[in-house]
Amino acid sequence: GTHKILMEMQDSRAVESVLIPIEENPVSGLTRTTLCVSSQVGCARGCVFCATGKLGLLRNLTVDEIVSQVYLAHRIARERKMPEINNVVFMGMGEPLNNLEAVLRALCIIGHRNTFGYSHNMVTVSTVGTNPASIRKMGMLPCRLAWSVHAADDELRRQLVPTTKHSMAQLRDAFVDALQGSKTSLLVQVTLMDGINDSALHASQLCALLEPLRPRVKVNLLPYNDTGPARLLRCIAILEPRLFLCVFDPGDGNV
């Protein structure tokens, strides 16, 4: 099962990383392990459904603190005989774009052949989308990109992510620019909340928002609480006919 790692640093602050064994092939039973790492202690983005957001931002992590999470996770995975870690996601505590320089240097280190040797396709950096200028800088990162959308409607998005200062169309267009010249696709994540952002209208709004990114976008639906199978399937039924690949993540939505 999932293994949570709490790493205490020299100033007695602590950050969490998570080892997640994932079933790769239901027939063969082969598995892989995804490592979720943090980029900050706390977070300033204030997403109303996120436990980390309630802490506020305490400080940025240093490059060595980010890389240390990867080193420690590898050691623990070996000790517990877990499948090989072949996927690293910056989806833990913090907003990577608010600590971009350290994240970039950490990516270069863990991708070096003399350290962990992670290729671009084995690492994903996720952002809530702080501002268009920062999003465009993501085009230089040696990794795949992910965008935590949660709502395509501007008013609802500001309710869920109160620090949102730009329209969703402006943030989307910045991702279009960031992906230019790259062969990678964009992972769009939506935390579905019962009766808040899981209706047919919300799914249609998401389709319209993502249209300029098609077909280089995959949508990951994460149920925050019990949205009910009917609502989940309704969202998928609207997205997939428009050629948006949907992935259902059965996690509990706790961040």
Image: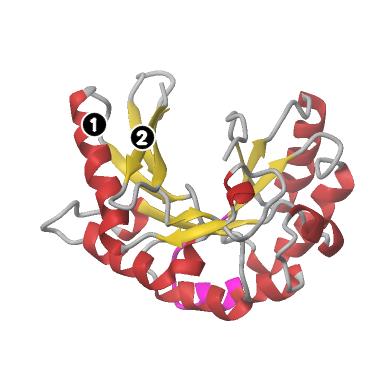
Judging depth in this view, the residue of 201 and 134 nearest the camera is 134
Residue in view at x 45 percent, y 61 percent? 59
Q: Is residue 166 above or below residue 159?
A: below
Judging depth in this view, the residue of 137 and 61 nearest the camera is 61
Hey, which residue is sitting farthest left in the picture? Answer: 114
Q: Is residue 139 visible?
A: yes
Percent across and percent down for residue 9 are 31, 48
Q: Which residue is mark 2?
A: 5
Residue type at mark 2 is Ile
What is the magenta range? 175-187
Q: Is residue 140 above or below residue 216?
A: below
Q: Quadrant of the C terminus?
A: top right
Q: Quadrant of residue 110?
A: bottom left
Q: Which residue is mark 1?
A: 76
For the residues labelled 1 and 2, the Cα–Cα distance comes to 9 Å
Circle 1 or circle 2, nearest the eye: 2
Residue 180 covered by magenta stretch: yes
Q: Is residue 249 above or below residue 204?
A: above
Left or right, residue 56 beside residue 41: right
Q: Quadrant of residue 164?
A: bottom right
Residue in view at x 42 percent, y 41 percent? 16
Percent across and percent down for residue 208 are 79, 62
Left or right, residue 193 beside residue 103: right
Residue 57 covered by magenta stretch: no
Percent across and percent down for residue 95 are 52, 60
Q: Are marks 1 and 2 in contact (CB under 8 Å)?
A: yes
Residue type at mark 1 is Ile
Hey, which residue is sitting farthest bottom in the picture? Answer: 133
